[in-house]
Amino acid sequence: MIGANPLDRRTAILGAAGLIGVAATAGLLTPAAPVPPIAPYGLRCHAARRGMSFGCEITSAQVAAGGAAMAAVVAEADMVVPSVEMKWGVTEQVEGRPDYSVAETVAAFAKAHGLRLRGHAGFWYLNLPNWARPELAGPGAEALILARVTDVVGHFKGRVFEWDVVNEAIEPRDNQAGALRLAPFGRPVGAGYIADCFHAAHDADPAAWLFYNDFGVEYDTELEDQRRAGVIGLLRELKRHRAPVHGLGLQSHIGVGRRFNAAKYRAFLAEVAALGLKIRITEFDVADNMAPADIASRDAAVANEARRFLDTAFDERAVEGLLCWGLSDRDSWLRQQHPVRVPADRYPERPLPLDDELRRKPLWQAIATAFDAAPSR
Ligand code: G3I
């Protein structure tokens, strides 16, 4: 029987096409029309062949607009994550009256197309509801946050495959013990309290995989050394508190022209894996503001940067897959939020696998090739 998974169906159809070809060669059948090129053979197929996954961030506005951009998501991805739609500042604009209707549009799109849904994020220090800010500075902060985590995870119980339970709790520049971030409390968010968030999420949906997610741990700088140490330290603390943490999400907003030390990054991934944790690259994109101006050179530089990073990351079998933060350049947050990052950057960034017209770029090829080269999981 052909499975419900669209990839299984596609594999079966291609397999059948192959059989027809063999039969035609043997003179058993009238030759069929030529098999069309496998244009929809998306990144998710390259990933699946290695037991891995490819996904991307989408928005409710993109879902509403539909069209070719969403067809591309379905062709390329097996998993989606909403951009802002599950964040607290969107879901509970009025205190005590959570409203998940916007997030539901993304969940419905995922369900309709057989895509797994990531939850992002249970607790993040940004995109908070305005009403919550004063309370978060007071003694009731932790109870309030635990209630939020319980509510959002419980609302999507059985529908979200994997949650970023807590996002970005490490900030070495805040100079706190354990490199913990001060915001939004004005005092460090303790590891014990972060552990409680994981317990709350697990109670709300015992079947969901629960991740801690963070950024800025990819490159060879003193600050990123400190972040890597902070993240490992936090994960160890969570384990010590017997928190049900299953994985580490690495945002991986990388960029051309930065100092990457493959051995150091590889050792970091091995250290995480040795804690018994899964790893997922959760928000991948490649900033090109330090790359040459002409598009062919920029795209090549972006693809090269991606390859050296992904080859190192995928070498670690605990890395289960990759999500890009958007699929097409036209939807990148880098364009929306940083249209001009440095004086040299007078061009719209091209940080994602598809261009503005949804054509596959050298970065698409780099990701496909990195999956192809990865050891099987
Ligand atoms: O939808 C409103 C629109 O109606 C309004 O006119 C406009 C005016 O500013 O704002 C729009 O909302 C914006 C929303 O993105 C949708 O575009 C918010 O202001 C803006 O703050 C929000 O930014 C998002 C940001 O997280 C904060 O939630 C970005 O799209 C999203 O890409 C970004 O994602 C984060 C991850 O969650 C964590 N890692 C970093 C990553 C990039 O910053």
Image (cartoon, helix red, strand yellow):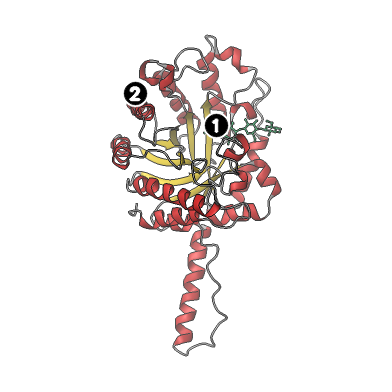
> Which x, y percent locates residue 235?
36, 28
Secondary element type, mark 2? helix
User: In percent of the image, x 28 and y 41: which residue is there?
Assistant: 263
Establish if 75 lies above or below 35.
above
Res 159 quadrant in image: top right
Secondary element type, mark 1? helix
Establish if 125 lies above or below 276.
above
- Quarter for ligand 1? top right
Say what amino acid the circle numbered 1 marks: Gly
Label 1: which residue?
Answer: 154
Label 2: which residue?
Answer: 237
* Residue nearest the observer in this picture, 21 or 326: 326
> Which x, y percent locates residue 118?
52, 40
Please give left or right for residue 147 compared with residue 19 in the image. Answer: right
Res 340 quadrant in image: top right
Say what amino acid the circle numbered 2 marks: Glu
The mark total stands at: 2
